[in-house]
Amino acid sequence: MDAVFKALADPSRRRLLDRLRARNGQTLRELCAGLDMARQSVSKHLAVLEAAELVTTVWQGREKLHYVNAAPINAIAERWISQFDRERVNALADLKRALEQAPMDNKTFVYTTYIRTTPERLWQALTDPAFTDRYWGVSFATDWAEGSPMTWTETGATTQDPEQIVLAHEPHRRLSYTWHTFSPQWAEANGVSEETRARLATERRSQVTFDIEPHGDQVKLTVTHEFDPTGILHSMCSQGWPPILSSLKSLLETGEPLPSDKG
């Protein structure tokens, strides 16, 4: 974690993180606008933030977009937080919340983590219900072919819908699908009010993509979740993804998921 603390120690890099917090998914040109720093300096600071995994990048056409990545702070909170005194715990918790909570007008959540496993094993963990149920509490019934329907089962509630489908299926490389349907049964099983469920049901259906890349003896997993920018699902899912992915990492690296905070 030395790289994380070193990256955060520089006020210019913290300022870049603040700008991404205000509007995630910016190009280098956009990040340079209005700053009293040369483009080359901004590029070097971004390289340090990327090396510390505090910033992750996604190519959209010919543009390279930069996103805040909460994974390193989440790892500190999950694995080290009990070893810090109260003031440090509060500081880390505040920073973790700030990085995970994205602005309301942002439509994309991006999270990158590195897992000591193989692409094949990670792919199995993303698609095999025996795995997904252990770290996520969700299981899927589908043949995983592009365009195939998906049946979701979560906390005893099963959802099916013609628009709940597989979008991309490239074994050991990329998996993408539309998000589940917000049925009354799902809402009741997950303690979601009818008012919130009805509001979620009016939003454009979101989609999630998992990109898998070998990285030495680890695998780089980037999760991209695209939302209706005017909806409320973004804030709900952006808080939910970090613990899910931390539990996935723990399961693959230690054989056990993180303890669940559910009932």
Image (spheres, rainbow, N blue to C red):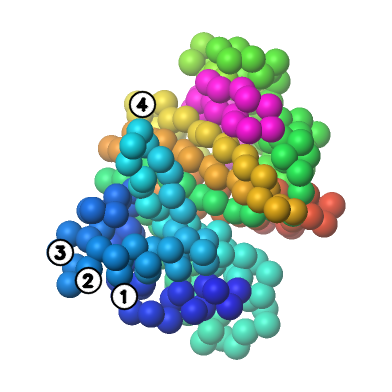
Dot 4: what SS?
loop
Q: Between residue 118 and residue 99, name the one nearer to us.
A: 118
**Given the image, on which type of amino acid does mark 2 rest?**
Met
Identity of the residue drawn at 33% across and 37% down? 62
Residue named by callout 4 = 204
Nearest the camera: 24 or 34? 34
Q: Amino acid at mark 3?
A: Gly
Q: Is residue 44 visible from the viewing direction of this image? A: yes
Q: Residue at x 56, y 22 (%)?
A: 168
Residues at marks 4 and 1, CA–CA distance in whole angstroms: 37 Å
Q: Which residues are magenta?
A: 167-190
In percent of the image, x 46 and y 38: which residue is there?
Answer: 225
Is tag 2's residue or tag 1's residue first in the polypeptide sequence?
1
Q: Earlier in the sequence, mark 1 or mark 3?
A: 1
Query: Of 86 and 217, which appears nearest the observer?
Result: 217
Does dot 1 land on a helix, a strand or a loop?
helix
Tell me, yes or no, whether the highlighted magenta stretch contains residue 187.
yes
**Residues marked 2 and 1 touching at CB (< 8 Å):** yes
**Residue type at mark 4?**
Arg
Residue 37, label in figure: 2
Q: Is residue 195 above or below residue 205?
A: below
User: In the rendered image, which quarter contains the N terminus?
Assistant: bottom right
Q: Quadrant of residue 243?
A: bottom right
Of circles 4 and 3, which is in front? 3
Q: Earlier in the sequence, mark 4 or mark 1?
A: 1
Task: Name the spot of residue 108 as percent of width and height, x first.
Answer: 39, 42
Q: CA distance from mark 2 to mark 3?
A: 9 Å
2 vs 3, front mark: 2
Residue 6 is a magenta residue? no
Q: Report the residue marked by disc 1.
A: 12
